[in-house]
Image: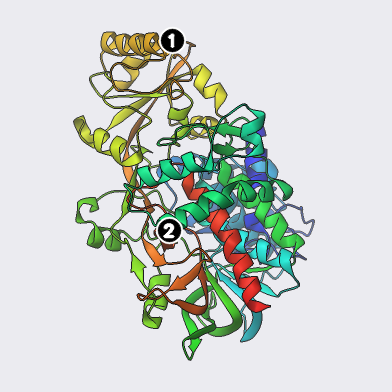
Amino acid sequence: MGRMKIWISYIVFALCGLTMLAGCSDDDNSAITPIEEQLQDGEWTGYGEGRSGTIVAKVVVKDHVVEDVTIVSQSESVFAQDAINTIVASAVGRQDVMSVEADGVTGATLTSTGVIDAINMAIQAAMGKAVDVQKTYQDGTCDIVIVGAGGAGLSAAVAAAETSSLKIVVLEKQGIIGGNTNYSTGGINAAETDYQHNLGIEDSKQLFYDDTMRGGKYENNPSLVRNFVDNAPVTISWLTTLGADLTDVGLMGGSSVRRTHRPQGGSAIGPHLMKILKEASDKNNIEIRTSNKVVGLIAEGGVVKGVNVQNADGSTYTLRAKAVIIATGGFGANLEMVARLQPSLSGFATLNHPGATGDAFDWVTPLGGALIQMKNIQIHPTAEATNHILITEAVRGNGAILVNYYGRRFVNEMETRDVVSAAILSQPNGEAFLIFDQGVRTSLASIETYANQHLLKEGATVGELAGFIGVSADALTATVNRYNAQQKTGVDDDFGRSAVEMPVALETAPYYAVCVTPAIHHTMGGLSVNTSTQVLKADGTPIPGLYAAGEVTGGLHGANRLGGNGVADIVVNGRLAGLAAARYCN
């Protein structure tokens, strides 16, 4: 249960800012503070936001005690069902609300939070405590409105707020903040940082630039890449001042050296980053409105003046502003759009949260805004094959190998994502197995999440592991032995994995495997922007008052995004967008 306390502390930002449906209001911390009013008998309904949407719970109270709890509606993954069942069981017999910290279940953090929220809302209703499930907003004004409360949106909000006293409002259509950033595990790429220097890592902005251009097949916009690379180390320092731990520096596919900054021990970057940005937003009095969906832009004479917004109850209002920043993410969850742009991806699963649907494109194109490289859609090579949960390539960066159903390696595991994905798809069943040992598991804290989600197969020996995953024990043992021998020489004669890409031999029992297959991960195309993050028209001129940052934009990553460049993109360009919008307002 200890790890859950850590993970819940990362996610508790999702519970703050609004009411129970969207979190907990400033004067209602009942999600974590017991209430002693007596429960009233009857049936009571509550709502919460899980990983994949709204969770509805029905609580039956008899003799002032919770007699039964039923989850009436939910869209969570199959792996999360154990977490749901455990929480439901722990709610029976209660006479007060549940504690998020004590009652969560390891391995399904957002689901746990949503289920507990739903049950707590119902319990509060049984106590006769009125629960305002949604706040309805009216027409208003502010200096900067930011659309999207993920890593890019909150980076922009905090950066803008730090420059001067501005009224900043962040709008999020989902019931919780974070978007895809909540699920990011890898880290933040940057070159020439103090952390690299302290670890003796030799890197340069030019090498970072070259790796990014090569990884994108030189379809990247060079000016965007140069601007990104130059501002990355400054952004690492900025995040550090906000309290981020980026002291662990790892290796991701396509990078020549270790430059992926993440929390100590290799913990997931996304939850940590959102916790830091939410705390900074609160400190700077930034208003965040969840369950508020932007449906269009307000423009006068070609100048953007605000947004039209839909409340959770369906009513609408206008929020006028001096500047608008779009940080809505990509469209990887819009499978119809993906299939239309790339028919070869029809039928693929997605790793994206349900809000990544590309809404912003319909707001901007009527104003002449240009869309670029929309067909550049990335599949990630290592999604767990059954539940389609992302397995970070940091696992490979820390030493794991890939084998097929014949127990043999078939690719340089540290190649770019497009290359590794194509190689896996060419194998039997379009699947492969990530193989690693206890040494790799110990080196990367994010692997514990996969263990908690029951995604790992484990064997005391390589041969035993082979039996559990259905491959030849002799073949897999020979493959691991050969890889270990090559790792010791630093020369991969089979597939050209470099010495730095083979940090350890796989020889510390027990041994682990995860069955993986490619899934839709990142959309490289989007709104055309310049280095000042202004949204551009087809002729290259900016739309006054309109800025964009993160996956909603196109041009930075070219044909293929490198691991670690996604989170770097949202914080580097999110920060730059906030600074640019603040300058425009002043």
Q: Is residue 573 above or below residue 581?
A: above
Is residue 289 at least partly visible in the picture? no
Residue 354: which disc?
A: 2
The quarter of the image holding the N terminus is: top right
Left or right relative to 577: residue 285: right
In this figure, what is the number of numbered marks? 2
Tell which circle, 2 or 1, labels the residue nearer the N-terminal end: 2
Q: Amino acid at mark 2?
A: Pro
From the viewer's side, name the closer residue of 114 and 378: 378
Q: Quadrant of residue 334?
A: bottom left
Q: Which residue is mark 1?
A: 488
22 over 144 or under it: above or below: above
Q: Residue at x 41, y 35 (%)?
A: 253
Q: Is residue 570 above or below residue 437?
A: below
Residue 171 % position (x, y):
57, 70
Q: Viewer-nearest of labels 2 and 1?
A: 1
Left or right, 139 with respect to 36, comes to: left
Identify the residue at image location x=50%, y=47%. 183
Q: Quadrant of the C terminus?
A: bottom right
- Determine whether, in the image, residue 265 is placed left or right of residue 549: right
Quarter assignment of residue 277: bottom right
Q: Secondary structure at mark 2?
A: loop
Q: Nearer the viewer, residue 80 or 438?
A: 438
Please state which amino acid type lies under the numbered disc 1. Answer: Lys
Of 108 and 56, nearer the camera is 108
